[in-house]
Image (cartoon, rainbow, N blue to C red):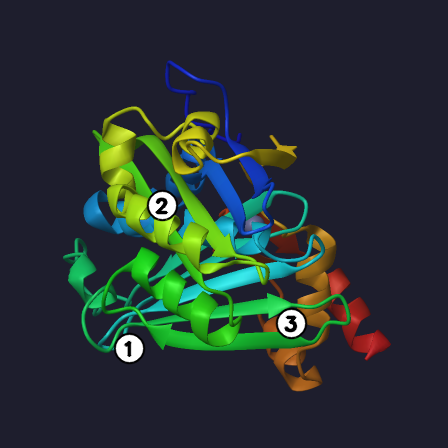
């Protein structure tokens, strides 16, 4: 039932590495996300995730996972890329358990148009496009930040980190695609820790000029998390502090959650639904699983309200 894209030949599945330099100056995260983004794209392919839009979707998913990994372990992160014309959005979530998912929300074509042209990917990376990051704290409180996305996903991510999290961050995300399938995807993030002194900062700033294009690193085969970590921290003593291999596409929807959302609807809305007397069919936008609610169940919700 679930189509999982075949794992591309080569290195093993998605991985995240985290390290800290022994001088306490830098925290570095490297990750590969090929399988997760492919699985997410497969679910959205019929809903706009093709060509350059699929590429952008892949990069945004990788970015959300990077942001999540840079924060405390129990935080949930949602990243929204809003098009410059405010007509389209790409929404991605990264969960503490390593799962991620995403959805493309593109304009509905006018009635009668069967094969509408996809929006140009440029609307997501031109002036006026916005990147919004929301993280949900354990208490349920949400903290948000919005930055311009005119310079692309990696650039917007750095701006967000600087402005909203007040952490000097250098990062890049990227993906390579062939015939509609992502052959490799990944990214890195380097953060300056409070102990940083001028010397290492200058060295790192200079070095990262060679690492600005993640697509270039992927093409050179230099983007496996282990290799990338070694390259980024070449000549510096560091300690690997965490490693995880549970990064994957998975949706958080379930019959209980969908029912819980339905139950919050005003009584009159549920009565309207019941008037039809048919099965209520709800599809999850992220994973396209369908949930059916028979009239008896809807009636039950009315009684509980
Ligand atoms: Zn779902």
**Residue 174 in the image: above or below residue 86:** above
Query: Residue 62 appears at what percent x and percent y?
Result: 43, 47
For the residues labelled 1 and 3, the Cα–Cα distance comes to 34 Å
| Location of mark 2 (residue) | 58
Kind of element beneath mark 1? loop
Nearer mark to the viewer, of 3 and 2: 2
Query: Residue 58 appears at what percent x and percent y?
Result: 36, 45
| Location of mark 3 (residue) | 274
Instruction: Work out whether residue 2 or residue 187 is closer to the camera in this orientation and state it.
Output: 187
Total labels: the figure holds: 3
**Residue 160 in the image: above or below residue 279:** below
Instruction: Work out whether residue 40 or residue 255 is closer to the camera in this orientation and state it.
Output: 40
Observer able to see residue 113: no
Question: Crowdedness of circle 1 by 10 Å Cα count: few (<14), some, many (20+)?
Answer: some
Q: Is mark 2 within 8 Å of ligand 1?
A: no
Mark 1 vs mark 2: which is more N-terminal? 2
Nearer mark to the viewer, of 1 and 2: 2
Observer able to see residue 52: yes
Residue 153 in which image quadrant: bottom left
Residue 184 in which image quadrant: top left
Q: Looking at the image, which residue is at 45% across and 29% down?
A: 230
Query: Residue 222 appears at what percent x and percent y?
Result: 33, 27
Residue 267 in which image quadrant: bottom right
Kind of element beneath mark 3? helix
Q: Looking at the image, which residue is at 60% across and 79% down?
A: 272
**Residue 233 in the image: above or below residue 25:** above
| Location of mark 1 (residue) | 86
> Image check: 115 left or right of 280?
left
Query: Residue 229 appears at what percent x and percent y?
Result: 46, 33
């Amino acid at each position: 039932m679930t189509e999982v894209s075949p794992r591309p030949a080569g290195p093993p599945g998605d991985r995240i590495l985290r390290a800290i330099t022994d001088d306490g100056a830098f925290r570095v995260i490297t990750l590969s996300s090929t399988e997760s983004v492919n699985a997410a794209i497969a679910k959205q392919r019929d809903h706009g995730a093709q060509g350059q839009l699929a590429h952008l979707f892949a990069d945004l998913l990788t970015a959300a996972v990077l942001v999540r990994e840079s924060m405390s372990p129990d935080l949930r992160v949602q990243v929204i890329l809003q098009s410059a014309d405010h007509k389209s959005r790409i929404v991605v979530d990264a969960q503490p358990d390593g799962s991620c998912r995403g959805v493309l929300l593109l304009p509905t074509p006018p009635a009668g148009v069967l094969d509408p042209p996809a929006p140009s990917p440029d609307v997501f990376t031109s002036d006026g496009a916005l990147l919004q990051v929301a993280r949900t704290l354990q208490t349920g409180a949400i903290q948000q930040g919005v930055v311009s996305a005119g310079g692309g996903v990696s650039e917007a991510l750095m701006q967000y980190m600087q402005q909203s999290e007040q952490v000097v961050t250098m990062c890049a995300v990227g993906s390579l695609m062939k015939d509609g399938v992502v052959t490799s995807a990944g990214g890195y993030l380097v953060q300056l820790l409070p102990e940083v002194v001028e010397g290492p900062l200058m060295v790192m700033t200079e070095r990262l000029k060679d690492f600005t294009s993640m697509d270039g690193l992927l093409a050179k085969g230099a983007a496996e998390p282990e290799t990338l970590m070694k390259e980024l921290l070449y000549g510096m003593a560091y300690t690997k502090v965490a490693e995880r291999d549970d990064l994957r596409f998975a949706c958080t929807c379930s019959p209980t959650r969908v029912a819980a959302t339905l139950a919050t609807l005003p009584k009159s809305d549920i009565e309207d639904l019941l008037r039809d007397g048919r099965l209520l069919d709800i599809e999850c936008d992220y994973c396209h699983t369908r949930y059916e609610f028979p009239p008896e169940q809807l009636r039950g919700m009315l009684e509980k309200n």
